[in-house]
Image: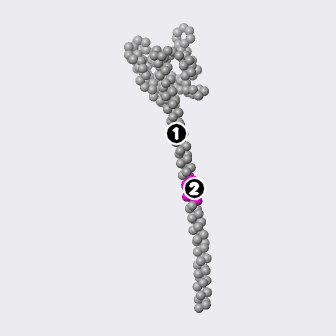
């Protein structure tokens, strides 16, 4: 019986020592799982921070774009209004809202004696119409281009204007005629 008891104790000891590496493996796997879960949580938290930052940036860009659109539309309306006589011609406004390149074009297009700006470039140049003169629509085309459709003494016209920033100020840089009616 003594031999049986020793054999039983030996077998129990062997089985216990065989379990110890398995328990260590289980503990290591639990530790690795906890580390992986922490990495995932950290990644999710970082992704949420980045998403919030991107939302803030996109909101800022959208607000800046809306502000630029409003400012460009105001400039177009004012220049059109001066060109059809709704508003008095304001040379300072022209100089403060048109680049030197645009001002040179307006000076070159001025075909009277002396110095002046060809403010009629902002419309069709109609002189003998009996209809209304007004801006019908102004649309952003992207890339700082804006299209404005208008009536000039009843004649339909359309131009597109390009804007740039100079010293932080929005300035009209180019003007392209899209629709020029046949005026007889």
Residue 81: % across, % down? 47, 18
The C terminus appears in which quarter of the rendering?
top left
Q: Which mark is residue 58?
A: 1
Mark 2 → mark 1, Cα distance in angstroms: 28 Å
Residue 176 visible at all: no
Residue 90: % across, % down? 53, 16
Q: Residue at x 55, y 55 (%)?
A: 40
Q: Which residues are magenta?
A: 35-43
Residue, disc 2: 39
- Front residue of 93/24: it is 93
Q: Give neighbour class at mark 1: few <14, some 14-19, many 20+ (Cα, 10 Å).
A: few
Hey, which quadrant is residue 101 in on the image?
Answer: top right
Q: Give neighbour class at mark 2: few <14, some 14-19, many 20+ (Cα, 10 Å).
A: few
Residue 26 colored magenta? no
Q: Residue at x 42, y 20 (%)?
A: 134
Q: Are marks 2 and 1 in contact (CB under 8 Å)?
A: no
- Front residue of 26/177: it is 26
Q: Residue at x 51, y 31 (%)?
A: 67
Residue 99 lies, with reference to residue 55, above or below; the image says above
Per the picture, the main secondary structure of the magenta-coloured stretch is helix
């Amino acid at each position: 019986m003594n031999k049986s008891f020793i054999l039983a104790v030996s077998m129990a000891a062997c089985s216990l020592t065989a379990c110890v590496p398995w328990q260590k493996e289980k503990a290591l796997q639990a530790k690795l799982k906890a580390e992986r879960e922490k990495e995932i949580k950290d990644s999710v938290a970082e992704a949420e921070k980045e998403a919030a930052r991107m939302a803030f940036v996109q909101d800022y860009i959208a607000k800046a774009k809306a502000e630029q659109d409003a400012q460009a539309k105001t400039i177009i309306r004012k220049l059109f209004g001066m060109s059809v006589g709704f508003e008095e011609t304001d040379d300072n406004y022209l100089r403060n809202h048109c680049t030197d390149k645009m001002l040179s074009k307006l000076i070159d297009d001025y075909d009277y004696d002396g110095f002046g700006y060809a403010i009629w470039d902002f419309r069709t140049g109609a002189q003998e119409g009996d209809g209304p003169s007004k801006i019908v629509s102004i649309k952003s085309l992207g890339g700082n281009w804006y299209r404005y459709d208008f009536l000039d003494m009843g004649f339909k016209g359309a131009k597109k204007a390009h804007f740039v920033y100079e010293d932080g100020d929005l300035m009209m840089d180019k003007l392209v005629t899209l629709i020029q009616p046949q005026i007889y």
